[in-house]
Image: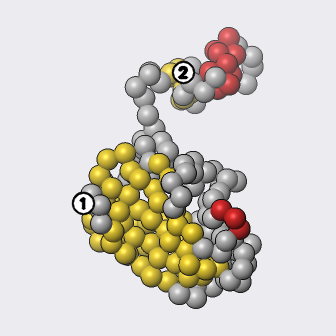
Amino acid sequence: GPFTYASFRMEVWRRHGVPFWYVDHTGIVRVAGPNWHPDLGDDVSSIEAGGKAVSEQGGDLPAVNDGDISTGWGPTGGRPNGKVSILFADSAHVTKIRFAPSDSGHSSPADYSVGLLLPDGSTREIANITGDQAQVQWREFAVPNAVAKGIYLDIRGTTDHTSSPTIY
Protein backbone atom coordinates (compact mmCIF):
# COMPACT_ATOMS: atom_id res chain seq x y z
CA GLY A 1 0.00 0.00 0.00
CA PRO A 2 0.99 3.65 0.04
CA PHE A 3 3.70 4.74 2.46
CA THR A 4 2.34 6.00 5.76
CA TYR A 5 3.83 6.64 9.13
CA ALA A 6 1.89 3.59 10.40
CA SER A 7 3.56 1.32 7.83
CA PHE A 8 6.96 2.75 8.82
CA ARG A 9 6.25 2.01 12.49
CA MET A 10 5.21 -1.56 11.63
CA GLU A 11 8.46 -2.08 9.70
CA VAL A 12 10.47 -0.82 12.70
CA TRP A 13 8.50 -3.12 15.05
CA ARG A 14 9.06 -6.09 12.72
CA ARG A 15 12.82 -5.46 12.63
CA HIS A 16 12.98 -5.21 16.43
CA GLY A 17 10.88 -8.34 16.96
CA VAL A 18 7.87 -6.55 18.48
CA PRO A 19 4.81 -8.75 17.90
CA PHE A 20 1.97 -6.90 16.19
CA TRP A 21 -0.84 -7.57 13.77
CA TYR A 22 -2.78 -5.44 11.35
CA VAL A 23 -6.40 -6.25 10.65
CA ASP A 24 -6.84 -5.77 6.88
CA HIS A 25 -8.81 -2.75 5.75
CA THR A 26 -9.51 -1.46 9.28
CA GLY A 27 -6.66 0.99 9.78
CA ILE A 28 -6.04 -0.54 13.21
CA VAL A 29 -2.61 -1.77 14.28
CA ARG A 30 -2.46 -3.85 17.45
CA VAL A 31 0.81 -4.15 19.35
CA ALA A 32 1.32 -6.95 21.84
CA GLY A 33 2.24 -6.10 25.42
CA PRO A 34 5.22 -7.47 27.36
CA ASN A 35 3.23 -10.44 28.72
CA TRP A 36 1.97 -11.54 25.31
CA HIS A 37 2.81 -15.02 24.07
CA PRO A 38 1.60 -16.85 20.98
CA ASP A 39 -1.28 -19.28 21.27
CA LEU A 40 0.53 -22.60 21.50
CA GLY A 41 -2.49 -24.88 21.40
CA ASP A 42 -1.39 -28.29 22.68
CA ASP A 43 2.33 -27.56 22.13
CA VAL A 44 4.35 -28.26 25.29
CA SER A 45 7.76 -29.05 23.80
CA SER A 46 8.74 -26.02 21.71
CA ILE A 47 11.12 -23.32 22.88
CA GLU A 48 8.14 -20.93 22.95
CA ALA A 49 6.38 -23.27 25.39
CA GLY A 50 9.47 -23.46 27.61
CA GLY A 51 10.74 -26.80 26.32
CA LYS A 52 14.46 -27.52 26.54
CA ALA A 53 16.13 -30.10 24.31
CA VAL A 54 19.20 -31.88 25.69
CA SER A 55 21.53 -34.55 24.35
CA GLU A 56 22.50 -37.73 26.15
CA GLN A 57 25.77 -35.97 27.03
CA GLY A 58 23.74 -33.19 28.69
CA GLY A 59 24.35 -30.37 26.21
CA ASP A 60 21.55 -27.98 25.23
CA LEU A 61 20.17 -28.50 21.71
CA PRO A 62 17.97 -25.52 20.80
CA ALA A 63 17.94 -26.58 17.11
CA VAL A 64 15.76 -29.61 17.94
CA ASN A 65 12.65 -27.78 19.11
CA ASP A 66 13.02 -24.31 17.58
CA GLY A 67 10.36 -24.93 14.92
CA ASP A 68 12.86 -24.21 12.14
CA ILE A 69 13.16 -27.01 9.59
CA SER A 70 16.54 -25.60 8.46
CA THR A 71 18.21 -26.42 11.81
CA GLY A 72 18.61 -29.88 13.28
CA TRP A 73 20.44 -32.28 15.57
CA GLY A 74 22.65 -35.27 14.99
CA PRO A 75 24.66 -37.36 17.48
CA THR A 76 28.17 -36.13 18.23
CA GLY A 77 31.08 -37.67 16.40
CA GLY A 78 28.98 -38.73 13.40
CA ARG A 79 27.71 -41.82 15.22
CA PRO A 80 24.65 -43.59 13.74
CA ASN A 81 23.02 -43.68 17.18
CA GLY A 82 22.19 -41.25 19.97
CA LYS A 83 19.50 -40.01 22.30
CA VAL A 84 17.81 -36.64 22.59
CA SER A 85 15.24 -35.54 25.18
CA ILE A 86 12.96 -32.54 25.43
CA LEU A 87 12.19 -31.42 28.96
CA PHE A 88 8.96 -29.45 29.45
CA ALA A 89 8.73 -26.31 31.56
CA ASP A 90 6.12 -28.11 33.74
CA SER A 91 4.52 -31.53 33.74
CA ALA A 92 1.95 -31.63 30.95
CA HIS A 93 -0.61 -33.87 29.25
CA VAL A 94 0.94 -35.50 26.18
CA THR A 95 -1.25 -36.85 23.39
CA LYS A 96 1.36 -37.41 20.66
CA ILE A 97 5.09 -37.42 19.98
CA ARG A 98 6.34 -36.37 16.56
CA PHE A 99 9.66 -35.60 14.91
CA ALA A 100 10.92 -34.72 11.45
CA PRO A 101 13.77 -36.94 10.23
CA SER A 102 16.18 -36.00 7.48
CA ASP A 103 14.62 -36.30 4.04
CA SER A 104 17.86 -37.56 2.51
CA GLY A 105 16.90 -41.18 3.22
CA HIS A 106 20.29 -42.57 4.23
CA SER A 107 20.46 -40.60 7.49
CA SER A 108 16.87 -41.19 8.60
CA PRO A 109 16.37 -43.18 11.80
CA ALA A 110 15.50 -46.81 11.05
CA ASP A 111 15.79 -48.37 14.52
CA TYR A 112 14.58 -46.16 17.35
CA SER A 113 12.23 -45.77 20.28
CA VAL A 114 10.18 -42.82 21.50
CA GLY A 115 8.78 -42.37 24.95
CA LEU A 116 7.87 -40.25 27.92
CA LEU A 117 9.93 -38.90 30.79
CA LEU A 118 7.53 -39.25 33.71
CA PRO A 119 7.32 -36.83 36.64
CA ASP A 120 8.66 -39.49 39.06
CA GLY A 121 11.91 -39.76 37.02
CA SER A 122 11.06 -43.01 35.28
CA THR A 123 10.50 -43.50 31.54
CA ARG A 124 7.69 -45.09 29.55
CA GLU A 125 8.32 -46.34 26.03
CA ILE A 126 5.55 -45.47 23.57
CA ALA A 127 6.94 -47.10 20.41
CA ASN A 128 9.92 -49.32 19.59
CA ILE A 129 10.55 -49.27 15.84
CA THR A 130 12.87 -51.56 13.89
CA GLY A 131 13.61 -51.27 10.16
CA ASP A 132 11.64 -48.07 9.48
CA GLN A 133 12.16 -47.18 5.80
CA ALA A 134 9.22 -44.78 5.43
CA GLN A 135 9.99 -41.59 3.51
CA VAL A 136 7.61 -39.22 5.27
CA GLN A 137 8.11 -35.69 6.51
CA TRP A 138 6.89 -36.40 10.08
CA ARG A 139 7.00 -39.50 12.23
CA GLU A 140 4.09 -39.30 14.66
CA PHE A 141 3.05 -41.57 17.53
CA ALA A 142 -0.18 -41.37 19.50
CA VAL A 143 0.20 -41.32 23.27
CA PRO A 144 -2.63 -42.44 25.53
CA ASN A 145 -3.37 -39.25 27.43
CA ALA A 146 -0.53 -39.22 29.92
CA VAL A 147 1.17 -36.67 32.14
CA ALA A 148 4.89 -36.34 31.51
CA LYS A 149 7.82 -34.07 32.29
CA GLY A 150 9.35 -34.63 28.85
CA ILE A 151 9.79 -36.89 25.84
CA TYR A 152 12.73 -38.77 24.35
CA LEU A 153 13.93 -40.17 21.05
CA ASP A 154 16.53 -42.94 21.29
CA ILE A 155 18.04 -43.75 17.87
CA ARG A 156 19.83 -47.10 17.61
CA GLY A 157 20.59 -46.96 13.87
CA THR A 158 19.91 -45.25 10.54
CA THR A 159 18.66 -46.62 7.22
CA ASP A 160 22.21 -47.19 5.94
CA HIS A 161 23.56 -48.13 9.43
CA THR A 162 26.61 -45.85 9.06
CA SER A 163 25.39 -42.25 8.65
CA SER A 164 24.61 -40.00 11.57
CA PRO A 165 20.86 -39.31 11.80
CA THR A 166 19.57 -35.77 11.48
CA ILE A 167 16.44 -34.69 13.34
CA TYR A 168 14.66 -31.37 12.71
Q: Given the image, on which type of amino acid does mark 1 rest?
A: Asp
- Image x and y of residue 134, in percent: 61, 82
Q: Is residue 3 left or right of residue 87?
A: right
The residue where tag 2 is placed is: 29
The quadrant of the rendering that contains the C terminus is bottom right
In the rendered structure, find residue 136 and report the number of the disc placed on it: none
Q: Are marks 2 and 1 in contact (CB under 8 Å)?
A: no
Q: For residue 111, what is the image quadrant?
A: bottom right
The quadrant of the rendering that contains the N terminus is top right
Residue pushed farthest left? 120
Which of these two is toward me, 16 or 78? 78
As displayed, is residue 130 above or below residue 13?
A: below
- Image x and y of residue 136, in percent: 62, 75
Residue pushed farthest top? 5
Residue drawn at 57 percent across, 69 percent down: 82
Q: Is residue 99 left or right of residue 120?
A: right
Which of these two is toward me, 18 or 143? 143
The residue where tag 1 is placed is: 120
Q: CA distance from mark 2 to mark 1?
A: 47 Å
As displayed, is residue 73 above or below residue 138?
A: above
Query: Helix, strand, or loop for circle 2?
Result: strand
Sequence-earlier tag: 2 or 1: 2
Q: Tally the marks.
A: 2
Residue drawn at 72 percent across, 80 percent down: 162
Which of these two is toward me, 59 or 35? 59
As displayed, is residue 146 above or below residue 92?
A: below
Q: Is residue 159 left or right of residue 112?
A: right
